[in-house]
Image: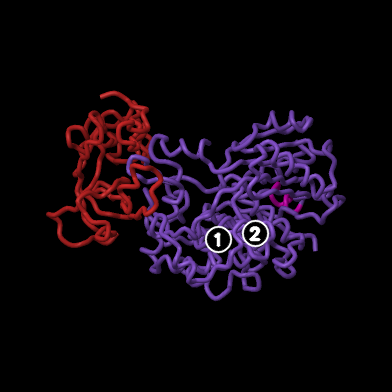
Amino acid sequence: MKPSTQRIDEATGRYLPIIYPEELPHWEGLRARRLVLQRCNACHGTWFPIGPTCPHCLSPEFAWAQMSGRGVIHNYVVFHKAWTPWLEKRVPYAVIQVELDEGPRLTTNLLDCPVGEVGIGLRVVAAYEDITDGITLLQFKPDTEASGKRHV
Amino acid sequence: MTEVARAFRDKTAVAGVGMKLGKFPGQTALSLAIDAFKLALDDSGLKREDVDGLIVLSFGSDYDRLLEALGLNVRYAHQGWSHGRFISPTVQFAAMAVAMGMAKAVAIVNGKRGKAFGQAGDTEMWRQGLGPHGESPAYGALRPAFGAAISAQRYFHLYGGSNDDLAPICVAFRKHARLNPDAVRRDPMTLEDYRRSPWIVEPLRLLDCCQINDGGSCIIVTSAERARDCRKPPVYISGMQGVHAGPQYHNLALPGLGVAQQKVYKYKPTPEDLYSYRMAGITQQDVDALITYDAFSPLVLFALERFGFCGPGEAREFVRNGRIELDGELPINTSGGLLSEGHLSGWNLLIEAARQARGECGERQVKDARIVQYACFLGESLIFRGDR
C-alpha cells in the first residue's frame, strides 16, 4: 500500500481519507480486516489519532497492535444537511464516536443500523468497508453478540 | 499574579473601533480592511502616522500588502491565524506590545470576503488526525457544525435536556439584533419559529448556526494615557487570559463532556481557570454584560459554565425567562451575536464589547454598563472597563 493525497474519488464523488506515510500499517491492517493501532512499548497505552510518539508518556517506542474491535457508542450526531452530492443520497446519516474497549475513541459511521436506532451506550463491533480498489475504511456495526447498553 | 500583571490592569485601552458587515460584492478583502481602518482612525481621532503597530490574521490581505496599500510603516507587525478563538489573544498581544513600549498604538485589522470556501477552512478538515472541530471527511463528518453538534449531544447526555434548551438563546439574540441596524438577521423569531427550523446536524437546527458575511473590522489599542486624549472615552483592558488547549479542550466543547478523547466529568472552573477576574480585581457578579463566541448556540451554555456564572449543567436553566436579554440579570451578546448580527471571525463581538463599555449602543445599550467581559468556552477572556 502507498500513501495517498487524493481527496475525492473522481468516479463517485465520495470524499476519501488522506493516507499519511506513518499511518500505513493501520491502513494495511484495515485491508486485511484487522483494526490495528499503536501501543506504547514503555507504558502499554494505546492512542488515537495516530501520531509519532506516545501521548501518555512521550516514548517513541511503539508497536502496531491488533485491537479487539469491540466498543460502545460514546457519542453520535445525525447529518440532515448534505454538503456534497454524494452525501445527498445518504442523508439522514449518523456519525458516531466509538469508545474502543482499549480506550481510544474513533469517529466513524454505523453500518447495518437504521438511523433511528443509533444511541449512546450501544455495543458495536468493527466492520470494514472497501471504498475504492485500494482503500478500506474502518466502520462499526451493532454487536449482535453483546447484550444491553453500557453506561458511558 | 505577577508584578507585571498587577501593574498592567487598566494601563492599556481600546481607543478606536471600525466595522463594516454585510454583503459587499464590489469590494475585496483588502478594501474592506482599509475601510475599517479608516473608520477606526476616525472613531479614535488618531492620525494614520500615530499607528506604529499592525496585526492581521490569515483571512484577507497579508500584513505587508495591507501596509503597502495604506502607505504606512510600523515598528511592530504580526500576522496570526483567523479562527475565532484567536481574536481575543490578538487583542492581548496588542495590549502587551503597547504596555512593553514596543508600539504606541496597534491597529488590529481584518478584511474578509464571503464564505470560507476556497480558504484554509476547507482544507484543514483533511489534516492528519481529525479536523480542528473533529471533522473526518471520509465519514461525512463535515464542517464546524459537526464539532458543535457532538458537543451539544454529550452535554444533553450528561446533564439532561434537549435541543429545545437552546431556543431561549437564539430568540434572545434575535431580539437584540432587531435593535441593531448593522445586524444581518433581523426578522422576528419566536420559540415556535425556532422549533420549526430544519435540522442541520441533529441536535442542531439551522437557527443554532451563524452565517458568514463579508466585512472588515479594526480595533486600535493604545496606552490608557493616550486613549484619554482620543475622541471617544477609553475602554480599559483590565484583565485577560488565554485560550486553554489540549486533548481535554476539544474545539466547540466544554471540558469534561467526553467529546473525542476528553475525559468525562462535571467541569467546574478552578481559580487558575478564572485568572482574568483576579487580574481585573472583579468577580462574575461585577460583569454588566457578557459577550461570547456564539458561532453555534450551545457555545453560550458552555461559556456560562466555563466561567462559573452557574454550576455544571445549570446553564440550560440560566438562559431562560429573559435572564440573558437586555434588561435581564446578565445580558449576553447585545448586538445579536454571531447568530443574528453576523460573523466577522468574531471581531464584531469585541467591537460590541467596547461600544457597550463606552455606552454608545443606543436602543440596545445595557444601562450603566461599566464592566463588559468577552469570555468563551475555551477559556479565553478579556475584561473591559468603561471610563464612567
Classified by dominant secondary structure, the portion drawn in magenta counts as helix
Kindly identify the amino acid type of the residue bearing the numbered disc 1: Phe
Quarter of the picture containing the N terminus of chain A is: top left
Residue linked to disc 1: B307
Going by the picture, which residue comes out furthest to the right?
Answer: B229
Q: Please tell me in which quadrant of the rendered image residue A6 appears.
A: top left
Q: Is residue A118 above or below residue A44?
A: below
Query: In the displayed structure, would residue A104 be above or below residue B266?
Result: above
Q: Is residue B14 left or right of residue B188?
A: right
**Which quadrant of the figure contains the C terminus of chain A?**
bottom left
Are the residues tagged 2 and 1 within 8 Å (C-beta)? yes
Horizontal arrangement in the rendering, residue A88 relative to residue B248 (left or right): left
- What residue do we see at 34% from left, 36% from top? A13
Say what secondary structure mark 1 lies in: loop
User: Where in the figure is residue A68, as x and y percent of width and height?
Assistant: 19, 44
Residue at 45% from the left image edge and 68% from the top image edge: B165
In this rendering, would B43 be left or right of B291? right
Callout 1: 10 Å neighbours few (<14), some, many (20+)?
many
Q: Where residue B360 appears, x then y in whole percent? A: 77, 61
Q: Earlier in the sequence, mark 2 or mark 1?
A: 1
Whole-angstrom CA distance, mark 2 to mark 1, is 11 Å
Q: Which residue is pictured at 28% across the width and 28% down the height? A: A24
Which chain is depicted purple? B
Q: Quadrant of residue A42?
A: top left
Chain A tint in image: red
Residue B262 shows in the view: no
Which disc number belongs to residue B206? none
The residue to which callout 2 is attached is: B373
What is the span of residues highlighted in magenta in the rendered image? B3-10
